[in-house]
């Protein structure tokens, strides 16, 4: 997730570019850059760090001109640096591009371009677009852009600028957002509405495959075939704050709704085209490497720890390796049994959590090999670990982690399958079957997000209870832990998750008439046992809200309400059951008037012990 902007008109471009990027910094903030055409040349200025580093750099000498593009980056290919910051240019400096997304086939394209004499300056996937444009250009800018788009695979929103065609900017999108803002003798481009809302409220929201030719005095939108299309003007009536949240009331809700896209991005480039294998090129492990370990530790905090519990299940079940999971603040003081035969996997959205970082350093000191699952490129944890797998969830702003959790689960699942491939612990047909189901998950998460009304009703009805219990067995229990943490942290309701089979060893004493119990019952291998536990709480007159897979006809006989999620393999269902639990926590917090995005006493990144 990056932020991109463009300006063409009569005024100076730089003030708009900087203003727009400021509004888009929530989309990425590890480096920023602008390119402005001064009537003769394109001047590119970029800087690693927050946008303020760029504004400081140009403060005494702002690029002048009324055609320009800009970018605020959230690194994917290539660490945050001046060179990797956008905009990127071709060899001549005649063409400049900014990009949000991932060009999946950039490596073969880059190799071909290098073989043809092009010189690259960055490690990014984006730079190939600028060089491709140079190589395919024969006097017709629009035709060259179309030719480029026919060659690149992956997801993108792109803005193209050329000093040979200073009367236009061209932009295109696939899977990533892009809007064109319509002004008076000036037009704007941005990846999101907040960037342009200070200048205009009249916009075109571009669709996948559409290409916009943006001039100062007009905008033409064409489809893939180059035919002009009549696009409806969308008038934005959100205020600036709502615009930043994509029209959602809170970042937490926005991020819950971003999950289908986020998990798709996590999978991107990691599944072989024919769907038969997981490919984690970042690791390049082999049988010898894996057989050097007699144990795996997964170490993390909070939600990331809960993802680790699911990770343990996946790795043990699919790749048959022994896994221990620990919270980082305990692990580092326990004198853990870690040596060169241990693989330590640390999980951290921010990549900066102090306890997790310390656990990672301690593991390295003890001789372990380390792998980080993180969301932030270039973070301390990413830099410290021997291997890194990025979740590619995009910036998570709300304190309560949602899309980071689901993307961590996806990564763990892929890692377990990858290890199973290497160790030969699964039949190829089973791997293929699981990959097929994995690929359905983004659409199935979208399905769970379509009807939130029943969840709002539960939240209103039970939102003022002081205690809520979550129960489940096997993977359902791991998800129950995450669901209860979400409810606690955003709504301040006392919530406890129990392994359903453990209730009778003490906690059942707390189950009295009217206490809400959220019961997850999706794990087929322990389904009957879970039903018995549900009957135990029902017999104490608890109000039970069941969570089941579609097609389950049993559960509704024993509980007060049921929320259904789409059917999939029981290994993958946590990716679906967690969604209503996130929403329940969110709407309970709303019912109670809590500050959802900034819960009391909590911080997004815990960089102190
Ligand atoms: C809960 C939450 C926290 C974090 C924890 C670890 O919603 O966000 O529990 O999961 O502080 O943070 P990271 O993943 O950044 O290491």
Image (cartoon, grey):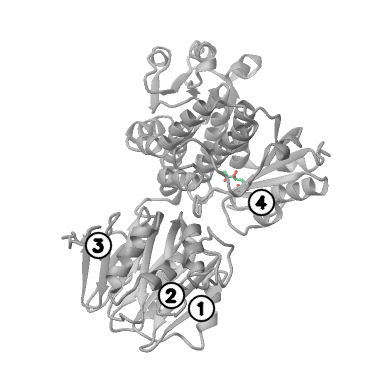
Name the residue nearer the viewer: 21 or 245: 21
Of the numbered discs 2 and 4, the one sitting upstream in the chain is: 2
**How many residues crowd around disc 1 within 10 Å: few (fewer than 14), some, or many (20 or more)?**
some
Contact flag, marks 1 and 2 (Cβ < 8 Å): yes
Task: Give the spatial CA distance, label 1 vs label 2.
Answer: 8 Å
Task: Give the spatial CA distance, label 2 vs label 3.
Answer: 21 Å
Number of the front mark, 1 or 3: 3
Name the residue nearer the viewer: 551 or 306: 551
Task: Give the spatial CA distance, label 1 vs label 3.
Answer: 29 Å
Number of the front mark, 2 or 3: 3
Which label is found at residue 353? 4
- According to the image, label 2 marks what residue? 18
Of the numbered discs 1 and 2, the one sitting upstream in the chain is: 2
The answer to whether residue 280 is above or below residue 457 is below
Of the numbered discs 1 and 3, the one sitting upstream in the chain is: 1
Q: Is mark 3 on a helix, strand or loop?
A: strand
Where's residue 529, x and y in %? 54, 12
- According to the image, label 3 marks what residue? 204
């Amino acid at each position: 997730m990056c932020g991109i902007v463009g300006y063409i008109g009569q005024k100076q471009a730089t003030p708009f570019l900087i203003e727009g990027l400021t509004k888009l910094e929530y989309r990425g903030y590890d480096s920023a850059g602008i390119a402005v055409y001064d009537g003769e040349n394109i001047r590119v200025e970029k800087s690693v760090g927050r946008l303020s580093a760029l504004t400081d750099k140009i403060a005494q000498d702002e690029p002048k001109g009324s055609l320009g593009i800009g970018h605020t980056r959230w690194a994917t290919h290539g660490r945050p640096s001046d060179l990797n910051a956008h905009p990127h240019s071709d060899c001549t400096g005649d063409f400049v591009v900014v990009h949000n997304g991932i060009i999946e086939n950039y490596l073969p394209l880059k190799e071909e371009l290098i073989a043809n004499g092009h010189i690259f300056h960055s490690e990014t996937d984006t730079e190939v677009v600028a060089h491709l444009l140079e190589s395919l250009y024969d006097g017709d800018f629009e035709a060259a852009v179309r030719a480029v788009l026919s060659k690149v695979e992956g997801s993108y929103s792109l803005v193209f600028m050329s000093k040979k065609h200073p009367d236009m900017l061209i932009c295109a999108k696939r899977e990533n957002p892009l809007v064109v803002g319509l002004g008076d003798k000036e037009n704007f481009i941005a990846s999101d509405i907040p960037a342009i809302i200070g200048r205009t409220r009249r916009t075109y929201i571009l669709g996948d495959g559409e290409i916009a030719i943006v001039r100062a005095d007009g905008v033409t939108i064409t489809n893939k075939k180059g035919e002009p299309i009549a696009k409806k003007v969308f008038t934005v009536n959100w205020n600036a704050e709502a615009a930043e949240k994509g029209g959602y009331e809170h970042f937490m809700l926005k991020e819950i709704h971003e999950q289908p896209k986020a998990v798709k991005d996590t999978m991107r480039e990691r599944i072989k085209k024919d769907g038969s294998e997981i490919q984690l090129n970042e690791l390049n492990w082999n049988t010898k490497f894996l057989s050097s370990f007699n144990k795996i530790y997964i170490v993390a905090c909070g939600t990331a720890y809960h993802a680790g519990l699911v990770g343990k299940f996946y790795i043990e079940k699919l790749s048959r390796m022994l896994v221990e999971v620990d919270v980082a603040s305990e692990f580092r003081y326990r004198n853990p049994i870690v040596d060169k035969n241990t693989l330590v996997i640390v999980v951290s959205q921010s990549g900066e959590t102090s306890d997790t970082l310390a656990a990672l350093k301690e593991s390295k000191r003890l001789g372990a090999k380390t792998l980080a699952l993180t969301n932030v490129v270039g973070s301390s944890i990413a830099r410290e670990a021997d291997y890194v797998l990025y979740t590619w969830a995009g910036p998570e702003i709300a304190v309560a982690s949602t899309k980071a959790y689901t993307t961590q689960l996806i990564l763990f699942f892929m890692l377990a399958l990858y290890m199973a491939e290497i160790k030969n612990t699964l039949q190829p047909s089973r791997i293929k079957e699981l990959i097929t189901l994995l690929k359905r998950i983004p659409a199935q998460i979208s399905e769970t997000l379509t009807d939130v009304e029943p969840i709002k009703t539960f939240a209103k009805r039970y939102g003022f209870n002081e205690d809520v219990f979550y129960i489940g067995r096997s993977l359902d229990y791991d998800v129950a832990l995450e669901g209860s943490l979400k409810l606690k942290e955003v709504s301040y309701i006392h919530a406890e998750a129990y392994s359903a089979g453990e209730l009778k060893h003490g906690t059942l004493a707390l189950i009295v008439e009217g206490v809400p119990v959220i019961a997850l019952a999706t794990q087929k291998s322990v389904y009957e046992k879970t039903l018995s536990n549900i009957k135990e709480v029902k017999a104490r007159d608890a109000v039970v809200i069941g969570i089941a897979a579609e097609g389950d006809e049993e559960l509704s006989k024993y509980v007060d309400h049921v929320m259904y999620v789409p059917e999939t393999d029981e290994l993958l269902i946590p990716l679906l059951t967690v969604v209503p639990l996130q929403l329940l926590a969110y709407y309970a917090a709303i019912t109670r008037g809590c500050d959802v995005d900034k819960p009391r006493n909590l911080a997004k990144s815990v960089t102190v012990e």
